[in-house]
Image (cartoon, grey):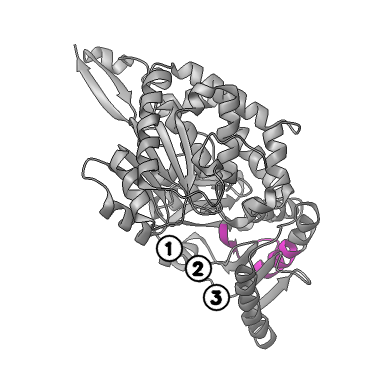
Amino acid sequence: MNLPNYFIADLPPEAALTAGMIGEACQTLKHNRETYLAGRSTLSLVETFCGLAEAWLHPEYPFRKLALQNAAAAGFSPATLASGLDAFFKPFTPENFNALLIQDFGHARRLDELLSTTAEEKQARAACVRGPELLAHIAAGNLPNPALMSLVLGFLTRSAQFVKCASGTSLLPRLFAHSLYEVEPKLGACLEIAEWPGGSAELENALFAEADCVTATGGDATLAAIRSRLPVRTRLLGYGQRVSFGYVASGALTSFNTKKVVARAATDIVAWNQLGCLSPHVIYVEHGGGVAAEHFAELLAEELARREEAEPRGDIAVETAAAIASRRAFYEVRAAHSPDTRFWRSENSTAWTVVYEADARFQLSCLHRFIYVKGVTDVKALLESADSVCGQVSTIGIAAPEERMRELAAQLARWGATRICPLGQMQNPPLTWRHDGRPALGDLVTWTDFET
């Protein structure tokens, strides 16, 4: 790729990063924010990002083509990456952004000026919100879309932004940043993209010293380490490790609907190669339907084999393939000696794996299209089986008759699920999604109340 050196991540690999460089970059970002971003209207920013999303959805858009040509460097096949980009950018519409702004702030122009809702007018009150001067993102390396969404939300709050990517994971954030720079260089000048190995304390401390707010995605230990190094005045928005699973109610598996449900489950497994916190580790199948859980697993294996033809998983690291092979070997032996376990896999590759177990306890998958299928008697048994991850569940995808959906959602919400959606949509949250049950924009801002 021949990209201009607009961002630190564009520098050649041999270029040495120093704390001084990071500090100077942050100071430049703050200056550019004050000059180019602070006075922008919300409407103009929404128009910019909707137009940019429309460009990314076009098959001939140069930056999209460049991303797909280098899909392997991002860890995906071109088909998987294309599907992921489509799912990410399609919700970028003025209507959806307007809904997000009203949901989090009560008014779409709250970032522009002091305003009152009808209720606030009755109390002789008005309010506005403001974002951080400099927002730093410690991006996870498994998926690009959380970092891209963080960038868009950060621009809406008029924040200069510094994105620190893990080593070797900056490709898609860089391409998105360059696409923004091409259409609006002044906005691009309010953004920095860099990558370095995690734990580079000198570089990270220089970034933390300049940031007003830091967002970070990672394990609990990673978040705790970041929190311990932040200045007292700096806020941390941490997104810890989360897991997800699917639930298929018995009434959903009719003779006319079973294939659709299986296909939706496969869609959630294939999307982003099952690597996100929204991807299912287990598909639970309620007993008593037209299809037993064991047969559902067999149908799912057949569907994943078909998906591999149309949307291959792509290559993975040798260490990852070895871990999958080791897990497969364990279940192959168990399946050979116990009727309570069955096992299906892709031939001559680790592209996909399905394991059926009579034991309903929640099991962490090794991902990369490795899925467990387990049978349960009802929702109560499901929640007992998943008790080990209670409080750590991001999304539950459900397939059920329409008349049961709301009842099931209420039970799962009381248990602690923060997002419940139809099976097949687990990796496609709406723009208004409250990540980990928290407001996406609302978490970033500070409010000012004006009592008239």
Can you give x and y, in whole percent of width and height, for residue 21 in the image?
39, 41
Amino acid, disc 2: Phe
Horizontal side of 357 relative to 98 (left or right) equals right
Label 2 to label 3: alpha-carbon separation: 9 Å
Residue 362 badge = 2
Residue at position x 65%, y 55% from top? 265
In the depicted structure, whether residue 337 falls above or below residue 224: below
Is residue 278 at least partly visible in the picture?
yes
In the picture, the disc for residue 359 is: 3
- The amino acid type found where label 1 is placed reads Val
- Where's residue 66, x and y in %? 70, 40
Rendering coords of residue 319 (x, y %): 60, 71
Marks 1/3: CA–CA distance:
16 Å
Q: Which is more N-terminal, label 2 or label 1?
A: 2
Q: Name the element at disc 1.
A: helix
Identify the residue shown where x is 59% and y is 23%: 183
Residue extending farthest bottom: 337
Instruction: Looking at this view, name the residue that lies furthest to the left.
Output: 451
Q: Which quadrant of the figure contains the N terminus? A: top right
Q: Which range is magenta?
A: 280-301
| Residue neighbourhood size for the residue with mark 2, other residues' Cα within 10 Å, grouped as few (<14), some (14–19), many (≥20) | many
Could you say which is closer to the camera, residue 199 or residue 81?
A: 199
Task: Tell me the tag on residue 389.
Answer: 1
Image quarter hosting the C terminus: top left
